[in-house]
Amino acid sequence: MTSASRRAFLATAAAASTAAALNASAALAQQQGNKPKQNQLGPEELGRTPHTRFAVNIEMWWRKLPFLERIRRAAQFGFPAIEFWNWRTKDIDAVARLTQELGLEVAQFTAWGFRPGLNNPKNHDRFVKAIEEACQVAQRLRCKKMTVVGGDDQPGMTQEQMHRHIITGLRRAAPVAERYGVMMILEPMNIRVDHKGHCLYGSAPAIRICREVNSPMVRINWDLYHMQITEGDLCGHLREGIKWIGYLQLADHPGRNEPGTGEIHYPRVLREAYELGYRGYVGLECRPKTTELAAAQAVHRADQW
């Protein structure tokens, strides 16, 4: 090849390489341009996420507003569902009418709280009655799940004894839940930060309780915030416990605020749950650190992978 030919060849190759690079850059720019940026989304789009279905906890979001107005705000942000705590303090008929009007689901509510303890057999008659009542409420709300709490430490009882009493109580109430088709989701807490003196924490004992109760209507309210504080290795424990998960909740730690404010990398954790086949709601039981708008933007980012 002559010098002139070599120069012509190199010039042609360089031009082709430049053109290819420009074409690739243009394609990438077009691809990125077609993907809406976070700050371009309207508030009503933030709750409509590509993978995870979120249920906003209206006890912790918009706390200064009247309860029914919080439900309206959840709908305005595009969330498909809400969750709340004690049903006895709510106007259930009004909640049922408004959620139906807005096209929102009630993902879950609290049927039985910390006191009196499910972990004490003297409370089991009352517990079974409360589950019957809560199932009737769930039907009015078109809701399929409700949280039950194990209870704080009982004087003179070992942890093993208290867990046995939880099993007994759940076994007694399970036929009621099965008859109504409403799942009881047992929530383990954490005792390092929020619930010192509580008898049930971590995934292993909760799984053991559900296994022994042996009912399809008894599963775990697997709060990732509590699990992070208690045991860590969130993805590993999700893989081990997926069969027993009835519901997921989240908050970041420390602070119990929205994803991105603490140490948990929620895009990875939510992706793990999705890849394991979880398609239920994920409850946003977190306190917005600044504003609900900023929290909703953070939740939307956590579902990007």
Image: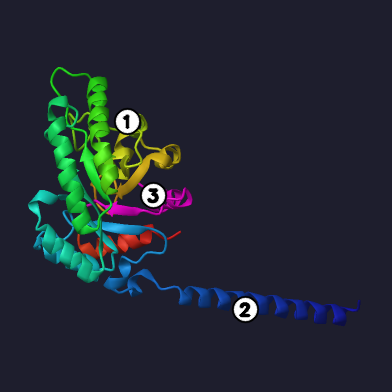
Residue 189 seen in render: no
Q: Is residue 166 above or below residue 267?
A: above
* Residue that numbered label 3 is attached to: 265
Q: Position of residue 270 (x, y in %)?
A: 40, 52
How crowded pointer 2 is (Cα within 10 Å; few <14, some 14-19, many 20+) is rated as few
Residue 142 seen in render: yes
Q: Secondary structure at mark 1?
A: helix
* Residue that numbered label 1 is attached to: 209
Q: Residue at x 28, y 72 (%)?
A: 44
Q: Secondary structure at mark 2?
A: helix
Give whichever of 195, 186 is nearer the camera: 186
CA gap, disc 3 and disc 2: 35 Å
Q: Residue at x 42, y 41 (%)?
A: 243
Give whichever of 183, 89 is nearer the camera: 183
Q: Position of residue 251 (x, y in %)?
A: 28, 49
Q: Residue at x 21, y 33 (%)?
A: 150
CA gap, disc 1 and disc 3: 29 Å
User: What label does residue 23 carry, if any?
Assistant: 2
CA gap, disc 1 and disc 2: 59 Å
User: Position of 96 compared to 107: left or right?
Assistant: left
How crowded pointer 1 is (Cα within 10 Å; few <14, some 14-19, many 20+) is rated as many
Q: Quadrant of the N terminus?
A: bottom right
Q: Is residue 260 above or below residue 207?
A: below
Is residue 270 covered in magenta? yes
Q: Nearer the viewer, mark 1 or mark 2?
A: 1
Nearer-N-terminus badge (3/2): 2
State which region is magenta: 264-289
